[in-house]
Each structure stands twice: as structure tokens, then as C-alpha cells.
Image: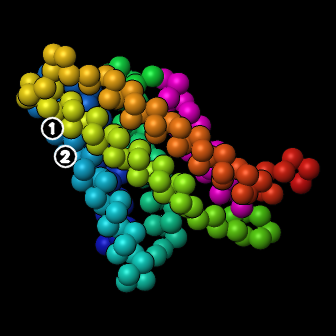
Amino acid sequence: MNLPNKLTLFRVIIVPFFVFFMCFSAIPYRFLYATILFGLASLTDMLDGKIARKYNLITDFGKFLDPLADKVLVAAALVCFIELKWTSAWVVFVILTREFLVSGIRLVAASSPKKAVIPANIWGKLKTAVTMVSMAVILVLAVLCEDFGIIGGDFPIQIIRDVLMYLTALLTVISGVIYVYDYREFIDPKK
């Protein structure tokens, strides 16, 4: 197994530990540990693709596992955010629905006679960047508020969380609509 695939696999392995720290309130500094793990996972996401492209280490396993690892990390964080009442279920529903929709279109395109590979467009990349940054900011706020008590009181933590998650949901919808429109030939019910 090459280095990019090991990094991707490491990202998948991190997720249960991330969820563990997010969900068990008896652990001191749990949000700090969860944030570090989220940061490591995000770093491996950035590194595995760069290394694979630079050294021509792109494999079918990597093409399969990399997007899956991303979705597992994001879905785990979103579910934890609902559990902690940091976001609404409808926001998570919108984000996850888009992920399933785009993944479905990609599967249909890849299995079509054209064997089309649908790359991430600028809207998809922007959506991913905003999602990851929003989640990181929300986690850092938890560290500062819950773990260390540095902020709190009148500080509008929930308003910041809501704005970040609503922005993520908005970009998710925009990128999803663009994907559906651009690749509508693959989901034509007449075919």
C-alpha cells in the first residue's frame, strides 16, 4: 500500500476516536482531543491527494477510499454536532442529501457507456473548504468555551455555529444544483 492510501486509511481509522471524544462528556479536554483528530484527518485529506498526484501514485483503491473517508469524517462530525445541539437536523439532512446525490450521479456516470469520471468543480471544492473550516471553527470554539472556559457568558457561540452551518448548507445546495444541472444527462429518466 502506497503512502497516499495509508494516509487515507489513517483518516478512516481516526473517525471512531473523534466520535468517542465528541460524545463522552466524562473525558477532560475532550473537545481539544477531538479537534486535534479532526485537524489531523483534514491534513491527511490535503496531503494524500497532493502526494498521489505529484508522484503518480493514484490507485483505484485511493479513488474509492479518499472520497469515502471524507464523507465518513464529515458525516461523523455532523451527527456529533446534532447530538451536542450545535446544529439542526435539517442542516445535516441538506448536507448529507447532497453528498448522496452527487455520489450517485458519479456512480451512474462511471458505469455509463461513456465511463465518465466527474471531477470536483469549483463549487464542490468551495463547499468542501467551507465545510471543513466551519467545522474546525466550531470545534475550536468548543475547546475555548467547554474545555478551557476562556470564552462564554455573552459570547454568541450558538449564533456563530448557526451562521457557519447555514453558510455550509447554502453552498451545499448551490454546488448540488450545479452538479445535477451539469450532469443531468446521467439522470435522465427517459434513458
How far across and down, in percent of the image, does residue 191 sit? 89, 54
The residue under label 2 is 36
Question: Label 1 sits on what residue type?
Answer: Leu
How far across and down, in percent of the image, does residue 75 sit? 44, 39
In the picture shown, does residue 184 fall above or below 25? below
Distance of label 2 from label 1 (alpha carbons): 6 Å
Q: Is residue 5 left or right of residue 31?
A: right
Q: Secondary structure at mark 2?
A: helix
Tell me the quarter of the picture where residue 88 sits: top left
Q: Is residue 18 left or right of residue 69?
A: left
In the picture shown, does residue 88 fall above or below 77? above
Q: Which residues are magenta?
A: 89-109
Question: Residue drawn at (31%, 72%), measured in percent from left and top?
Answer: 3
Question: Label 2 sits on what residue type?
Answer: Ile
**Which quarter shows the N terminus?**
bottom left
How far across and down, in percent of the image, does residue 173 sit? 59, 40
Estimate how packed mark 2 is, as few (under 14), some (14 to 19) or many (20 or more) residues with alpha carbons within 10 Å.
some
Question: Residue drawn at (40%, 52%), measured in percent from left and top?
Answer: 129
> Of the numbered discs in the image, which one, if any, rests on residue 185?
none
